[in-house]
Image (spheres, rainbow, N blue to C red):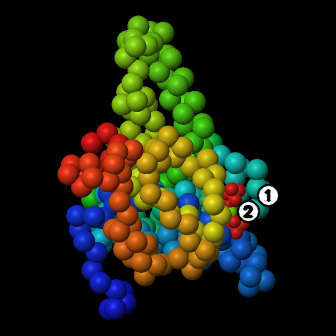
Amino acid sequence: MNSDIPPLRPDSLPRHIAIIMDGNGRWAKKRSLNRIRGHREGAESVRNIVRACREMGIEVLTLYAFSTENWQRPRPEILALMGLLKSFLRSELGEMMENGIRLNAIGQIERFPDDVLTVLREVMDQTRKNPGMILNLALSYGGRDEIVTAARRIAAEVQAGRLQSEEITEGVFSKYLYTEGMPEPDLLIRTSGEMRISNFLLWQIAYTEICVTDTLWPDFRRDELIQILHDYEKRERRFGVTGDQIKKTPRRGLTE
Ligand code: IPE
Ligand code: IPE
Ligand code: MG
């Protein structure tokens, strides 16, 4: 860590950081390499950022690793991403256990090939009781899919008579999302400059602070994350009320 960066204030750290890890292909293209080399280098950034977040005491780190739309990419690229995911899970299990990290996956994971799913389920199972940071991987994830899936599950509950339609509040609805029980993201980072959400956490980011950096994901490491967290510290999150109100009664989320 650079010694000229002042320490972060623990009370203003985000509880939940979500990252759209974008730019692997462009990183490779700039070096006249195959896109897959970009994904491989991107996996190194994942290791670096997971470690940094865990050391800082972040509660949840959600990483957008594969979207529902990414299934339309060329098959060799999809297969390479699956292979990388599998080897990442295998190589990181030891460190997750040592550091109390719990792995969770959000998205249509059943669409993954059996070999990948087996490793994923094994790592989730083995880390299930770890008390530390939740590493939440968004895999075959789409925000619209998540909302539709929640709506279907709620409809089934209503149909079975276990839930009244008047009882469906925002709080109840959010319990049917993949992120059930997790705090909403305080900070969303997107690398490689694109000013879009690309179907990520559509419901959960209602009041999330957004930071877009031009850095390509394989070049994104701890020092830049710390710079972003310093910038986040200075932001005034108002949740729709006035600046004076928020100073008198600070809050940490939309529902707090
Ligand atoms: C992000 O990098 C990784 C995934 C979406 C799986 P990209 O592969 O989208 O890289 P660019 O956007 O083409 O540079
Ligand atoms: C978003 O990146 C998805 C992931 C980072 C997994 P994309 O590269 O797929 O997004 P678009 O297509 O540029 O919006
Ligand atoms: Mg991209």
Whether residue 159 appears in this view of the structure is yes
Provide residue 223's location: percent of width, then percent of height.
43, 81
* Label 2 neighbour load within 10 Å: few <14, some 14-19, many 20+: some
Whether residue 81 appears in this view of the structure is no
Mark 2 residue element = helix
Left or right, 200 with respect to 103, comes to right
The image quadrant of residue 50 is: bottom left
The reply to whether the C-beta atoms of the residues labelled 2 and 1 are less than 8 Å apart is yes
Ligand 1 rendered quadrant = bottom right
Amino acid type shown at disc 1:
Pro
Provide residue 171's location: percent of width, then percent of height.
36, 31
Amino acid type shown at disc 2:
Glu
| Residue identifier under label 2 | 77
Q: Which mark is residue 241?
A: none
Provide residue 76's location: percent of width, then percent of height.
76, 61
The CB of the residue at mark 2 lies under 8 Å from ligand 1: yes
Provide residue 236's location: percent of width, then percent of height.
35, 60
- Residue at x 48%, y 9% (from the top left corner): 159
Mark 1 residue element = loop
- Residue at x 27%, y 80% (from the top left corner): 7
The CB of the residue at mark 1 lies under 8 Å from ligand 1: no
- Residue at x 26%, y 48% (from the top left corner): 245
Left or right, 155 with respect to 130, comes to right
The image quadrant of residue 133 is: bottom left
- Residue at x 74%, y 82% (from the top left corner): 30
Q: Which mark is residue 74?
A: 1
